[in-house]
Amino acid sequence: MQASSVQPVFKLELNHKVTPGIVTVAKYDGAHSCLTASAGYDKIIIHHPHGGMISGRAQRSSAHGEVSELNLSQAVIALATGPIKPDCNRDMLLIGSPTQILAYDVHDNSDLFFKEAPDCVNVIIVGYFGKYNEILVIVGGNSSVLALNWEGNEIFWNVVSGKVCSMITFDFDRDGENELLIGCEDSYIKVLKNNQFIMELAETGPVLCLSQISDVRFAYGIANGTIGIYEEGIRLWRVKSKQNAVSLRWSGDSLACCWANGRIDWRDGTGRVHRRVQMRSNAAAMLLADYRSIGVPDLVCISDRGEVLGYPPVQENMGMNTTSNKLANEEDRLAVTELLNKKQALMVELQHYEANASSMNQDLERSTTAMPTSTKLQVAVAADTDEGCLQLAISTNNSTIVRVALVLAEGIFESGETLARHPNSTQLKSLLYVPLEPPRDVPVDVHIKALVGYPESEQFHIFELTKQLPRFSMYTMLSTSIVKTKIDSYVSFRITERVQRICIWINQNFLLDEEIDLENEDTRELHISFLCLRDRSRVDLDFGADGQVKFTTHDIRLAGDLIQSLAIYLNLSDLQSLARFPEAEEKLRSEMNIVSEVGETRYRLAAETAEKAQLITALLPAAQDAASYDLKEMLNRYKDVILLNEELLTSCHIRRATQEQAVASLKNLHTILQQAARLRVGKYSKAVITACRAAVSDNNTEALVKILQAGDT
């Protein structure tokens, strides 16, 4: 690794603190790059190093001659820029506040549009998407994504299952149209194509960073410190750090990662760090921008104290002040170091073998370190209905014992991704159990490392195995003799598929003691029941001879997961269904009522606030005038002002609580709408979202219930 060889090509100080994550670079005049960032609660700073002082609302900063300040009336949550205006190559500034979006032309000092955002604003990006031939402003909220054109008109809308943390647009499937990749707080990376989700990539935490690398690759960063690269939906590699990644950018032929503590490292195609630098304070952002106007973008790194450093994109071949000879020597040194490490590991292993051999000569029956060469590690997973979990059984095939077991799995253990089991010396056996409780219905690879030997051994052998848990591993099969309980919640649909293929799907996606095998080839229907280990609820899967399928379960989310999994396996492009989930319908009605009531309360409070503010504006001059002729009248006027001000403060707290309630209700409502869409596939799922948006806009609760039940028929 090289650290001292990485030198910035430019440095500057903004003399302002910068809010992490709310930074962008734009060309407001169409030619020169300007760094734009949030510098506090409601202040935006614009650095213009190439002249052309920003005018209009922005005022020159007293702390820096090349910085202009733009003060707003609301908190700045997100910033984005782009040439959204037709026939104009100048970038426009998009400002996201908690409940509003403002498109501002900095150069002409004019507003393009002002849009309310009831679902809040977390992320804003600008780019092309799908079949639309204009640049869109895409806004990610608490449970939805919204696209606007340059006039502020809504182009499309969709719901997601969690808060939107990051977004990018690029041609994910190489069909000539951009898809939208959404990183969510619920640990999924979702791919949206033409307002329809075509893929979900499960991760182990909120996805904070997304960045395109090439036509088929993108990088991601998670809140637990993990970064990695995907290629066509397959993860190539990942590494984990104690810090969170602030930004990821592909610079030259390396992936540059900016960490929250101010560390910046460059990684090759395998994830190995080959150079690193450390900023003087915590990082705020890292961007690719042609800040020197040389035609090549630099890697611009900004700290939270306003320090800006620029690094050239091709760091491998330039700016190192070294000859090719020295570079070769550096590679040789790294190769020699790696070989020495391998040699040391082999020497330790040789010492262990020599110790085994000497002990075998002393005691041929059994030594403290030797172990039969036929020793094998065996792993099995079984459902434990009493404990409500899966039991991972790790055992040996002879009298040896399992001293320690280290289990690595993503998103299963509350304390992290690794669990170590090391029984007391009095409880050592050849069989060791490890409880597993997958919180989500996703496939999980479980990696096991075990130390195997004899109870009195001083040295142990390491065995490594990998076991894959299927997607629906937390559901165990019930006996057909158990009487079915009546469940009113179900989803039904029709498919034309052989029962034999359905059996294969069940065998692949559920954890079964024995695989399902049809008694004869003429069997045309299948009825099977499962018990959920999480809440001990029942799930019935009925496949009729006429192609009618019925999934009976209280959990609408599980019904959607089953349909999506079956559709992917059978390669179904479109699927319509009928659903009946009384609990979800009642919750939908309740949330719609809350949203409607909260909306009326907000309008009433806003009107009262405006009226009281107007009274205060009138009373203050009157009180000042009364001071010249009647002190008692002046005191009375000021008392009225104080009372009105207290009422305004009370109204402000009520409005804040109302807003929080509205956001929570909208999130719950959008979650139900997404679950309703997942009960369908393809064009029918897309139609459900479109119809739900219209019903929500019209405040038509019964229409929403009918859409949940029958889709957009």
Image: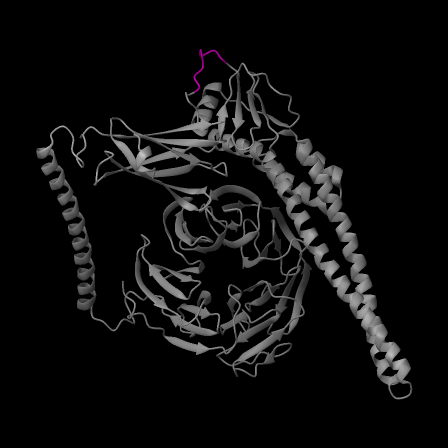
Where residue 185 sits: x, y (%)? 53, 50
The residue most toward the front is: 426
Where residue 57 sits: x, y (%)? 64, 76
Where residue 406 sits: x, y (%)? 34, 41
For residue 68, side relative to residue 13 (left or right): right
Is residue 493 visible in this depiction of the protein?
A: yes
Residue 517 magenta: yes
Q: Main secondary structure of the magenta part?
A: loop
Q: Nearer the viewer, residue 461 or 217?
A: 461
Q: Nearer the viewer, residue 361 or 114?
A: 361
x 55%, y 20%: residue: 543
User: Quarter holding the C terminus?
Assistant: top right
x 56%, y 52%: residue: 164
x 64%, y 78%: residue: 56
Residue 465 magenta: no
Give the residues in magenta. 516-523
